[in-house]
Image: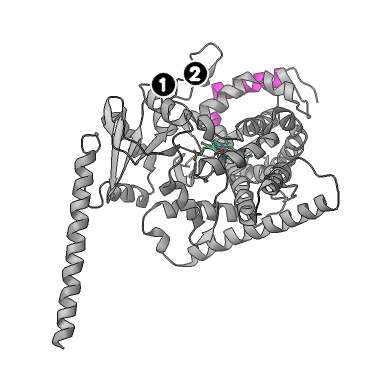
């Protein structure tokens, strides 16, 4: 009995010692970073986590809190969470230095968490999340041809065909009364497009209400959001099972798709030079086959290739519904360039300049990917402030895009900021990130966005359903909380155009 008590006492003593030593370590970290400005810490150990947790629990938009901190403490803002410190960098010089250079890798602490989602391998070492530079460079190099200008021009036919299917679905709703979520419709069309052009899959998400894929993607993104918050990934329950099942579903479909394509290649069949072919080519160049990495990229493109775009499109519809004068200008442009033309070609897109401006402005105020994170391994000085080695640096286009310092009257939706003669934003606007790790799908996404928006504008008048919040939701990507509820009517007057 005495021995047991002694052992318990020793264990308790060791635990207290460990806690004491850990607290000393946290104190040492605080001392190392406290010269960097930041909001007051609410707790010695939790640092700024408590306030972030509260914001998330109240379903408030966390990035608005970061914006407040940026205005108050910027251009560098420190966050503490236990012994970890991150620094948000809000100066154009800092953005240029760290995003444009290949020397600063993506932060493993952040992107590594997306390797698995709630215990299932998810984005793994796919193109978005891979942190090792050499592994990333090899993958990017083989993927680039599937995003070349010539290849993208060849995709116009599919963009047109699928956008036409969306228009048919919208026509069924266009009685001026039916209310529907624009986000849902945009998610479905962008999903159908990426599945077709990337993997040769006909998902028919637009016509098949029972398709499991849109929900699976939502669940995966929700799972990823959860894994960002310490301790939440250890929660069990129905939701966790659903997330895991969604990841398994996508990996299963990916596997079938890959097997079929490999068989076709082996049988000498002609295959399109799409993203899947590129992924398989890349794998064939490797000494050892890595089917898991191929599946990582399948999910990466499946998710990254449509969700962000659906959000951009629905935010754009939301902004247009709130700004009738901008909508009128767009109608006029679309009528002048396209009239009632159905088959939009690449040259037409370059003439839709005001539409490009509107899409850019939408990404300034509502960037689906609010920012990115880099790891800085050596000590350096940013804006005259010394930053210790091994710090995570956070870059936010959402925050910088809403700062008066960089954009006059920043909360006003004004596409003329992006007109030909306006000064170009200097490293304070990066919805597709910048530098080597910038979005491979940027041109693809903006071509697709223009085709879908142009067709929508050719055919419909839309109205936002009153009473919705227009708030933003951080759900892995930034999306409209209430889904942009709309009512549609066929357009009565397309000025100077005939069917
Ligand atoms: C409006 C639409 C889109 C937005 C706003 C967007 C935004 C971004 C951003 C900000 C990044 C950098 C992420 C980071 O640093 O963590 C990124 C990377 C990436 N995006 Fe996009 N994206 C869009 C559409 C697409 C599309 C359509 C595809 C594929 C067809 C795509 C594929 C990728 C891939 C593979 C990467 C990783 C690139 C690399 O690290 O080499 N994205 N995207």
Residue 396 or residue 163, whichever sits in front: 396
Indicate whether residue 49 is drawn in magenta: no
Identify the residue under disc 2.
417
Residue drawn at x 45%, y 52% is 113
Which circle marks residue 463 in the picture?
Answer: none
Indicate whether residue 324 is drawn in magenta: yes
Can residue 464 be spotted in the picture? no
Q: Earlier in the sequence, mark 1 or mark 2?
A: 1
Which range is magenta? 320-336
Label 1: state its secondary structure: loop
Question: Compared with residue 325, is residue 28 higher up or lower down, i.e. above or below?
Answer: below
Residue 385 or residue 252, whichever sits in front: 385
Identify the residue under disc 1.
407
Q: Is residue 321 left or right of residue 229?
A: right
Residue 36 lies, in percent from the top left, at 24, 34
Bin the neighbour count of mark 1 within 10 Å (Cα to Cα): few under 14, some 14-19, many 20 and up: some
Residue drawn at x 56%, y 25% is 358
Total marks shown come to 2
């Amino acid at each position: 009995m005495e021995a047991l008590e002694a052992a318990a006492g020793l264990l308790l003593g060791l635990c207290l010692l460990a806690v004491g030593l850990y607290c000393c370590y946290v104190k040492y970290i605080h001392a190392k970073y406290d010269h960097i400005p930041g909001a007051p810490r609410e707790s010695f150990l939790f640092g700024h986590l408590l306030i972030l947790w509260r914001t998330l629990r109240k379903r408030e938009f966390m990035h608005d809190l970061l914006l407040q901190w940026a205005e108050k403490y910027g251009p560098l803002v420190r966050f503490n969470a236990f012994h970890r410190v991150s620094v948000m960098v809000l100066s154009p010089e800092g953005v240029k230095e760290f995003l444009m250079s290949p020397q600063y890798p993506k932060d493993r602490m952040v992107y590594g968490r997306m390797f698995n989602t709630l215990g299932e391998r998810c984005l793994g070492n796919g193109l978005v999340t891979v942190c090792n530079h050499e592994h990333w460079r090899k993958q990017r190099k083989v993927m680039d041809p599937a995003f070349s200008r010539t290849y993208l021009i060849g995709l116009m036919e599919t963009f047109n065909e699928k956008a036409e299917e969306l228009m048919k679905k919208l026509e069924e709703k266009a009685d001026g009364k039916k209310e529907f979520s624009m986000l849902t419709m945009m998610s479905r069309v962008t999903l159908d497009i990426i599945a077709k052009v990337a993997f040769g899959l006909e998902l028919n998400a637009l016509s098949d209400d029972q398709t499991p894929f849109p929900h699976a993607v939502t669940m995966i993104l929700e799972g990823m959001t959860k894994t960002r918050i310490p301790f939440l990934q250890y929660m069990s329950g129905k939701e966790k099972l659903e997330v895991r099942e969604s990841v398994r579903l996508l990996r299963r479909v990916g596997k079938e798709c890959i097997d079929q394509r490999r068989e076709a290649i082996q049988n000498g069949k002609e295959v399109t030079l799409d993203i899947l072919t590129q992924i398989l080519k890349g794998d064939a160049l490797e000494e050892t086959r890595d089917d898991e990495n191929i599946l990582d990229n399948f999910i990466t493109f499946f998710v990254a290739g449509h969700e962000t775009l659906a959000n951009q499109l629905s935010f754009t519809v939301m902004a247009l519904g709130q700004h009738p004068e901008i909508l009128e200008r767009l109608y006029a442009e679309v009528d002048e360039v396209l009239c009632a033309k159905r088959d939009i070609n690449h040259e037409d897109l370059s003439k839709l300049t005001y539409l490009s401006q509107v899409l850019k402005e939408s990404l300034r105020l509502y960037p689906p990917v609010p920012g990115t994170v880099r790891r800085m391994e050596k000590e350096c000085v940013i804006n005259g402030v010394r930053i210790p080695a091994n710090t995570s640096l956070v870059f936010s286009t959402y925050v910088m895009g809403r700062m008066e310092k960089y954009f006059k009257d920043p909360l006003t939706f004004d596409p003329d900021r992006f007109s030909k003669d306006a000064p170009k934003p200097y490293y304070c606007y990066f919805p597709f990130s910048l530098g080597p790790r910038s979005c491979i799908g940027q041109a693809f996404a903006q071509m697709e966005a223009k085709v879908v928006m142009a067709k929508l504008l050719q055919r419909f008048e839309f109205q936002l359903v009153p009473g919705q919040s227009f708030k933003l939701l951080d759900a892995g990507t930034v999306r409209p909380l209430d889904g942009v509820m709309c009512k549609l009517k066929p357009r009565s007057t397309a000025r100077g155009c005939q069917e």
